[in-house]
């Protein structure tokens, strides 16, 4: 199975371009064979190109020259995953995105999708941070995991179990106005002691949630003498790393979306090992 990187279609021999009217288009080599598209959708152009590449692959495998080839999609950051609810005045964007990307694929794989997969979205497997392996997921003895809100609780608990932490996850509470998206409050229970604390969540945009958490962390009697690290599966960092609270001295994310390079504060974990697990299923 050939892996196509959406950051470099040309390396797979795929020609992509946009017509003057803005329509995305793609041309794939003949007899392309089984394909896995590793999609990192950062813009609507990325979504459009992925749609036509998958469409071309699907057309070829379904045609006279296709030979029944398989078309798989690994889309770790699934577009619109956070738009999974509606007040009957807004779309459920997650479902719309599945209609664009999912109908030209045999299998879809994701990584730490934002919420439970609703009915109508068929996903083969949703990998989680615990699947990254022990070389990335280790912790010192005095380590504690913090879940910033109820939505992060399950992924925080699964990661704590994977790395062998016996201490309970520290569950915080975040309150947001659904209509405006603005925070209305944040709560954090008392820290159990001085130690190394790891915040676990799926997405970081500008960092507002984690800045509020860091403020509360420093108010605790153990906060100043403890370390605070952040792990997010999908690092967008729309306001840059400097906008994230200085108390958070180390940040981990994956290359699902992030385009920043590793530096003294940021570690970008490649998802290649997840791709290898997917490829194992193709043999």
Image (cartoon, helix red, strand yellow):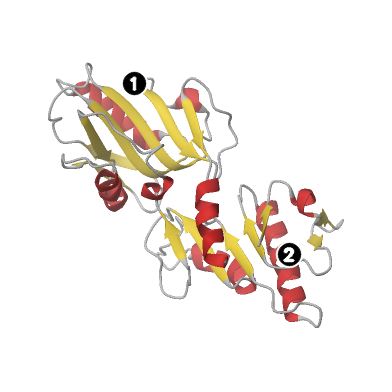
Callout 1 crowding tier (Cα within 10 Å): few <14, some 14–19, many ≥20: some
**Residue furthest toward the right?**
20
In this picture, is 54 found above or below 15?
Answer: below
Is residue 62 visible in this depiction of the protein?
yes
Who is closer to the viewer here, 267 or 241? 267
In this picture, is 49 found above or below 175?
Answer: below
Side (left or right) of 207 relative to 177: right
Mark 2 or mark 1, which has the lower sequence index?
2
Residue 9, given in percent of the width and then of the height, sits at 75, 51
Residue 220, given in percent of the width and then of the height, sits at 17, 24
Which of the 4 image quarters holds residue 55?
Answer: bottom right
**Residue furthest toward the front?**
283
Side (left or right) of 245 relative to 77: left
Q: Which residue is drawn at 64% across and 49% down?
A: 43
Q: What element carries label 2?
A: helix
| Quarter occupied by the N terminus | bottom right
Residue 174, given in percent of the width and then of the height, sits at 27, 43
- Reading the image, the residue beneath label 1 is 247
- The residues tagged by marks 2 and 1 sit, at their Cα atoms, a distance apart of 44 Å
**Residue furthest toward the bottom?**
64
Say the numbered circle drawn on residue 52: 2
Side (left or right) of 89 relative to 20: left
Q: Residue at x 62, y 54 (%)?
A: 38
């Amino acid at each position: 199975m050939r892996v196509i990187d959406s950051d470099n279609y040309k390396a797979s021999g795929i020609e992509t371009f946009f017509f003057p009217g803005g329509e995305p288009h793609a041309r794939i080599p003949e007899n392309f064979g089984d394909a896995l598209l590793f999609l990192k959708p950062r813009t609507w152009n990325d979504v459009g190109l992925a749609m036509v590449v998958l469409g071309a692959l699907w057309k070829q495998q379904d045609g006279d020259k296709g030979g029944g080839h398989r078309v798989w999609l690994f889309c770790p950051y699934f577009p619109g995953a956070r738009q999974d609810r509606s007040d009957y005045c807004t779309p459920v964007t997650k479902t719309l995105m599945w209609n664009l990307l999912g109908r030209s694929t045999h299998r879809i794989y994701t990584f730490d999708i934002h919420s439970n997969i609703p009915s109508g979205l068929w996903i083969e497997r949703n990998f989680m941070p615990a699947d990254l392996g022990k070389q990335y997921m280790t912790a010192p003895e005095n380590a504690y995991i913090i879940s910033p809100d109820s939505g992060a609780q399950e992924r925080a608990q699964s990661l704590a179990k994977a790395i062998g932490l016996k201490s309970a996850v520290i569950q915080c509470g975040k309150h947001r106005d659904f209509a405006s998206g603005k925070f209305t409050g944040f709560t954090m229970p008392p820290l159990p002691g001085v130690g190394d604390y790891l915040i676990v969540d799926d997405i970081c945009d500008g960092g507002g949630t984690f800045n509020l958490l860091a403020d509360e962390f420093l108010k605790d009697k153990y906060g100043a003498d403890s370390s605070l690290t952040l792990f997010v599966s999908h690092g967008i960092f729309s306001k840059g790393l400097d906008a994230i609270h200085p108390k958070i001295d180390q940040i981990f994310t994956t290359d699902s979306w992030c385009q920043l390079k590793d530096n003294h504060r940021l570690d970008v974990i490649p998802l290649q090992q997840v791709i290898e697990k997917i490829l194992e299923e193709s043999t």
